[in-house]
Image (spheres, helix red, strand yellow):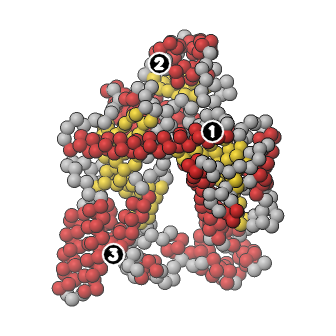
Amino acid sequence: MTQDVEPTLFSTGARIIAEYVKVLPDAPGVYRMLDERGTVLYVGKANSLKKRVANYTQVGRLCVRIQRMVAATKTMEFVTTPTQTQALLLEANFIKKFKPQYNILLKDDKSFSYLEITSHPFPRLTKHRGALTTKSQYFGPFASTPSVYASLETLHKAFGLRGCTDSFFAGRKRVCLEYHIKRCSGPCVGMISQEDYATSVAQAVSFLKGKDTSLQAEIAAQMQAASLKQDYERARVLRDQLRALTNLQQQQSVHIQNLSDADIFAFHQKGPLTVVQVFFYRMGRNYGSVSLFPQRMDEEDSLPEAVATFLALFYADKTPPQEIYSNIVPDPQDTQALEEALSHLAGKRVSVSAPKRGPKALVVEEALKNAKEALARKESHATSFRKHLGALAKRLDIGDLQRVELYDNSHIQGKHRIGAMVVVSPQGLEKASYRTFKIREAELPQGGDDFAMMREVLTRRLSGSTVKEAGLPDLIILDGGAGQVSAGHDVLEALSLDIPLLGIAKGPERNAGRETFHRKGQDPFSLEDDQELLFFLQRIRDEVHRFAIGTHRKGRDKNMLRSRLDDLPGVGPKRKKALLAHFGSAVAVQDATPKDIARVDGISDTLAQQIYDYLHG
């Protein structure tokens, strides 16, 4: 729960800021406010640093949130820029880097998925997430990963482009299952010529660029010709290809005149919550939508000004389309700076506008309708969490719960040990704040040592940079009984922290509904008299358990896929790739003689003998 700040503290921060104002230039730039520990509290841009920063000295005109920021300010840093455009870009970069407490933060922002066609002689069609390069062709972004996989499955069936990695492709001696189920044309073993494969690639690119009408007409003509020649097998393949493309086209149809490459934004606020609905349209196709809930973009902000910052942040690691439409845009001066900044990122002209009539205004209106519905769902979800967190705080007789952290460990007899942390707030599950910890402690005894693992996880979370980044929780919940609670309090005492701690022990025979709760210095208790609160705690306990188990399984499965080639002394990724390309598999390398191994490019006789000795040691 927040407390009032003394007026003298407001004036102290204002006096510090006023000293900077005296020497600031009347020029565009970026400013940072820092607290006594050097933590960045806020990053802002200004067309005039002198005029903008001077506003913070008039404390009486500021809202309570900004007054608190001014009170905490002990020093400031400034960077002047030649233009407002550069100031906007620099502000977005600083916000991404420092994640200041008082700035708009895209905590639920993510990198979206693309379809990628590589530059290999036999190009690969696959999903891509992350930075885009100039070596491949990309189509997207897609709002959801399932839609990418669905599109990939259809495109593989339609065009027969391979989806395997280059190393797998190079090592094949016979066709794989993908060829037999008609999802690949088998270029790895010469089942299709490079010329014919290039034709399939060109057709896929044409389809993804929205030129599907002529392509489908061409496929239909080929199907008819094959049928007339009584080549019914070929006609069936072409028929299936045509059906797949038609189905995908219907799923991604837009039916909006003159809308090719565009992103549609709709901003909606209600109380302290803001939602941004984004629709993606590429090559005249609908690539889905996503709802984002930015942090600290509340009713006290100037929304048009916040929109400029939001868009700069959103596209900091994404390529903007040619057109961006929104129900709210910044003032003309800021819009011009934003367009110049986004055009610089895209390498082409980007326009930002708020259409008032016509088909584009209708799609913005549809996005706004979706935004309102998403915010209503979020509000209902948050109401439930606020209610249950309030009941939990009352039951435990502790203060307001704004951040609750739950911990669980997962391992198999001390192997592949993972610690997991889940975060709950009055807004719900904060999935962007989830963390995993790979246990560093030396190998544990047979069966593992859950208490030692919990001590390590809590020590790493509650000390060092993680505290500076995420702050401290109001309550810690451990999946375990008295022993786990004791281990947790050992860490809290060692770090001189006073944080309430609760352990949830499973009931007899792991019977859900008969959990026992443990707190230091108190007798174990149950919540059979409060089924609603019990169910809530079961839900969030199951969430951290799911997260821990899932992360553990991923690590275990990844380790199982490793081969002894990964640990060969003197063999890096390039030589390992050469070995696999030459022999086709790690098993074949192990079966080879030193003389056979030495035939691989980059492998000397001496190294070949070392590899052989290692694999047979």
> What residue did someone put label 1 on?
393
Q: Are marks 2 and 3 in contact (CB under 8 Å)?
A: no
Residue closest to the eye, 196 or 31:
31
Q: Quadrant of the C terminus?
A: bottom right
Task: Give the residue displayed 33% in from the left and 26% down from the top.
Answer: 331
Going by the numbered disc 3, the residue's amino acid type is Asp
The image shows residue 153, relative to residue 58, as above or below, that is: below
Give percent across and percent down for residue 531.
58, 51
User: Residue 196: which numbered mark, if any?
Assistant: 3
> What residue did someone put label 2 on?
52
Q: Are marks 2 and 1 in contact (CB under 8 Å)?
A: no
Going by the numbered disc 2, the residue's amino acid type is Arg
Residue at the outermost front position: 529
**Which quarter of the figure has residue 156?**
bottom left
Q: Earlier in the sequence, mark 3 or mark 1?
A: 3
What is the C-alpha distance between the residues marked 2 and 1? 42 Å
Viewer-side label of 2, 3 = 2
What is the C-alpha distance between the residues marked 2 and 3? 62 Å
Give percent across and percent down for residue 493.
80, 40
Asked whether the viewer can see residue 16, the reply is no
Going by the numbered disc 1, the residue's amino acid type is Ala
Residue closest to the eye, 534 or 20:
534
Viewer-side label of 3, 1 = 1
What is the C-alpha distance between the residues marked 3 and 1? 68 Å
Q: Is residue 202 left or right of residue 489?
A: left
The image shows residue 557, relative to residue 463, as above or below, that is: below
**Which quarter of the figure has residue 598?**
bottom right
